[in-house]
Structure formats: structure tokens, C-alpha cells
Image (cartoon, rainbow, N blue to C red):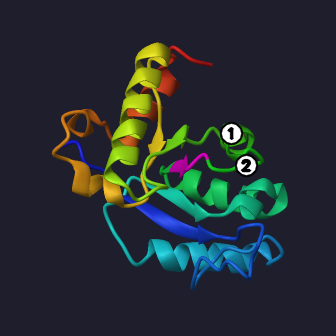
Amino acid sequence: NGHEILLQIPMEPFDYPSVNPGRGTLLADAEPQQNLEELRRSMGRLTNYSGVVNYMGARFTSETAAFQPIIREISARGLLFVDDGTSARSQTVSLSESVKGAYAMGDLVIDDVQDKEAILKKLEQLEASARASGRDMASVLAELTRQRSHRRASGLAPAGSAVDRLESGESGSD
């Protein structure tokens, strides 16, 4: 039915530990092996997912030494990495390209404000941007599933479809 499962992995934000993503958080100052063990533990709890998406992680995804082994592991497993696009400092693009890994970047957070009208407005913004660029990725925290009755929500495509288009060079944006 066009659905994909993405495994959300908690990663260290800049204001950690006052903002704590939870148990199993990948930390920028941890030894790479420790982060890989946490990643593998999380990945071992679920099956049939097509990729991994960060939960928080602005600091972690900006630290090349910490993030590179994680991207390498995800890529070696043939999985997609989806960056929610909330951090301008993220090294997702350069690290994923260095290992020829599949990745996608979120362009917009749809439900950061938990209000039906605000969500519908973001969906309209996403639709307009997608029409202009030929593709767009949105990060949906949770609320969108309650808004599925909206006709535009039914036109959303799985994250993997954006990656396939990016890899084949069909995207209208650079």
C-alpha cells in the first residue's frame, strides 16, 4: 500500500542532557563502538523497516567523527537514512555520499504545531514546494495520521520514493 517503516533512533541534541531523547541515545562524545552497539540494539528490536530516521540529534548529526560510523553501518545494511531536516549543521549529505548511502533530507516539519489548521497549512506549503521543485520531503512528528481525511494527505509518498528519484537524477532540485 505504499507504506514504509522508518526506525527512529534517538540522537543527542545540542541542549543534552536538559533535553533528553531517551534511552539508547547516540552521543557525540561516546566511543564509536558504544554508539554502534546502541544502534544495533535498536535495530534488533524491529523488522521490516526500510530505513532509519533521526529523533532530535542536531549535535550528533553535526559531529562527523561520531556520525560517520553510524551512517556507514546503516548504508552497509542497505538501509535509507532520513534526516528530518531540522538542523542546518547536519552532515548527512556529505557522509552519506562518501559511503554511497541512500539518504533523504526533510524540507519541512508538518506537525511541529499541534493544530489542525496549522498542519493543513503546512501540507499546502509542502504541496506547493513539491510542485515547484519536483520533490520534497516532510518530517511528520505524529499528528498527520489524524489528518489523513484531508485530500492532500492521501497524496503523500513514502520516503523511499524521494530517494529513488534523487538517485536516478529525476529531481527538479539540486
CA neighbours of label 2 inside 10 A, class few (<14), some (14 to 19), many (20+): many
Tell me where residue 164 sits by quadrant.
top left
How far apart in space, not on screen, are marks 1 and 2 (Cα)? 8 Å
Residue 146, percent from left and from top: 23, 57
Residue 157 magenta-highlighted: no
Relative to 3, 85 lies left or right: right
Tell me the quadrant of the picture where the N terminus can be found: top left
Q: Quadrant of residue 130?
A: top left
Q: Which residue does the image show at 63% across and 38% down from the upper left?
A: 100
Residue 90: mark: 2
Q: Position of residue 52 (x, y in %)?
A: 49, 58
Q: Which residue is mark 1?
A: 93
Q: Nearer the viewer, residue 96 or 90?
A: 90
Q: Quadrant of residue 68?
A: bottom right
Q: Going by the image, does 43 lie left or right of 94? A: left
- Whether pointer 1 and pointer 2 mark residues with C-beta atoms closer than 8 Å, the reply is yes
In the image, what residue occupies the spot 72% across and 57% down?
A: 61
Amino acid type at mark 1: Val
Front label number (1 vs 2) = 2
Q: Is 164 placed left or right of 82 in the picture? A: left
